[in-house]
Amino acid sequence: MLKRLLAPALIALLPLSAMAAPTLEQTNFTKLQGGNATIASYKGKVTVLNFWATWCGPCREEMPMLNRLRAKLAPKGVEVVGVALDNKEEVSAFVNQLKIGYPILLGDSDTLNLMRSLGNATGGLPYTLILDRKGKIAAKLTGLLDEKKLEAAIKTQL
């Protein structure tokens, strides 16, 4: 009798637990300029998804290179997207100062857990994913990026 009562309740909870830990594709981010965005909107392009913060020295160092690389590879269907783990005001000032031309999304309190679920067990920054044209993870890169290493990872998806 108890089994019959508990089974439907447990089954009803399954979708809730799945929603508690959204996948990268399901995650909603806030655009720096306002509004929402999902990574799914970049399907069809090879996407360099870079998690960063204004207080992260290596992140700050690699952003101009990411900006140049985006300009160089955009005609081949490559997009660079930054996900900032920081507050909007500091991110906006920093992006304007460096004249970053690629889309910047703002992470929230769940973004660190998302990064960990995507293979960044330590939560270290910068953390970069290369997504293929279908939005699937093709490469995971931790730490300061070297332009040649990044380009090599991207070219496997072109």
Image (spheres, rainbow, N blue to C red):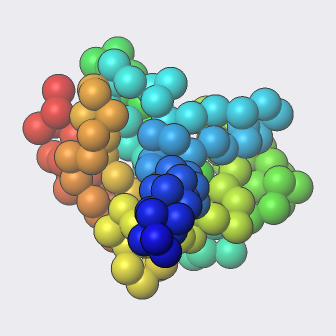
> Which is nearer the eye, 72 or 106?
106
**Residue at left 27%, top 26%?**
133
Left or right: where does residue 65 sit relative to residue 113? left
Q: Is residue 52 above or below residue 88?
A: below
Name the quarter where the C terminus is drawn: top left
Considering every residue shown, the one lying at the far bottom of the view is 122
Left or right: where does residue 155 sit relative to residue 107? left
**Residue at left 11%, top 38%?**
156
> Which is nearer the eye, 155 or 85?
85
Percent across and percent down for residue 140 are 27, 60
Considering every residue shown, the one lying at the far left of the view is 156
Q: Can residue 51 be seen in this view?
A: no
Percent across and percent down for residue 33 are 80, 33
Q: In this view, does 8 lie above or below 137?
A: below
Q: Can residue 116 be seen in this view?
A: yes
Percent across and percent down for residue 130 are 30, 46
Res. 36 image quadrant: top right
Left or right: where does residue 110 sit relative to residue 50? right
Res. 20 image quadrant: bottom right
Considering every residue shown, the one lying at the far top of the view is 75
> Which is nearer the eye, 99 or 29?
29
Percent across and percent down for residue 154 are 22, 40
> Which is nearer the eye, 36 or 60?
36
Q: Tally the numbered discs.
A: 0
**Residue at left 38%, top 72%?**
120
**Residue at left 49%, top 36%?**
39
Considering every residue shown, the one lying at the far front of the view is 1
